[in-house]
Amino acid sequence: AFTEFTGGTASGTANKYTMDFGWNDVTVIAIGAQYQLNDDTWLRFGYNNSNAAVPSDRAFTNSALPAVAEDSFSLGASRNFGENWQAHFSYTTLITNSVTAKNDPGALGAGDGTKISLGGSSIVGGISYRY
C-alpha cells in the first residue's frame, strides 16, 4: 500500500512525509478491441474494472484523494486524411462510485457518514502527421 511521499523543494532538497492513506492493493482487469472499418478508419472500445483502493474505514482520511473508481468504458476512433494526416477521437466515462466512512481512525470518530465519490467523463481529440 502507498504510505510514503517524497517531494523536492526549489533548492533541490528532498523532504519525506509519511502519509497513511490506508489504501488497499487493487486488482485491475482491462479489455479492449480495435476494428478496422475500412482502409482509413479504425474504431476502438475498452472496459476497465477494479476494486476501490479506499476501504470504508479510511473514507474520511481520503476525502481529498477519493481512489474509489471501479468501472470505466472508452470509445475511440482514428481516421486517415490524405497520405500523412490522421485525426483521433476518444471518449471515456468513469462510472461514479462512492464509499461512506465508518470507524475511520484518522477522523477520531467525527468523520463517520462522510461519503466520498469519484466519477466523470473526458473527451480527447488530436491530429497527427506521419513522416
Image (spheres, rainbow, N blue to C red):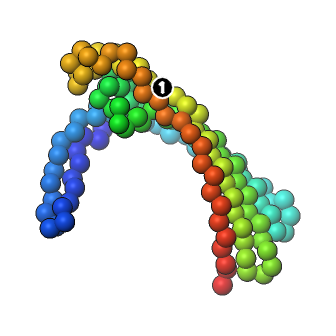
Can the viewer see residue 47 in this picture?
no
In this rendering, the answer to whether 19 lies above or below 41 is above
Residue at the right extreme, as displayed: 38
In this rendering, the answer to whether 128 lies above or below 131 is above
Query: Which residue is painted at 32% across and 25% down in the image?
Result: 60
Q: Secondary structure at mark 1?
A: strand
In this rendering, the answer to whether 10 lies above or below 123 is below
Where is residue 57 drawn, in percent x and y? Answer: 32, 21
Query: Which residue is painted at 23% across and 48% down in the image?
Result: 5
Query: Which residue is painted at 37% across and 20% down in the image?
Result: 114
Quadrant in the picture for the N terminus: top left
Quadrant in the picture for the C terminus: bottom right
Where is residue 90 drawn, in percent x and y? Answer: 67, 54
Nearest the viewer among 110 and 99 is 110
Where is residue 129 drawn, in percent x and y? Answer: 67, 78
Left or right: residue 114 versus residue 79 is left
Left or right: residue 39 versus residue 64 is right
Asked which quadrant contains residue 84, the reply is bottom right
In this rendering, the answer to whether 57 lies above or below 68 is above
Left or right: residue 47 versus residue 4 is right
Where is residue 25 drawn, in percent x and y? Answer: 37, 36
Residue bearing mark 1: 98
Residue at the bottom extreme, as displayed: 131
Can the viewer see residue 118 in this picture?
yes
Q: Amino acid at mark 1?
A: Ser
Q: Residues within 10 Å of mark 1 (few under 14, many from 20)?
A: some
Query: Which residue is painted at 65% across and 61% down in the image?
Result: 125
Left or right: residue 25 versus residue 47 is left
How many numbered discs, if any? 1
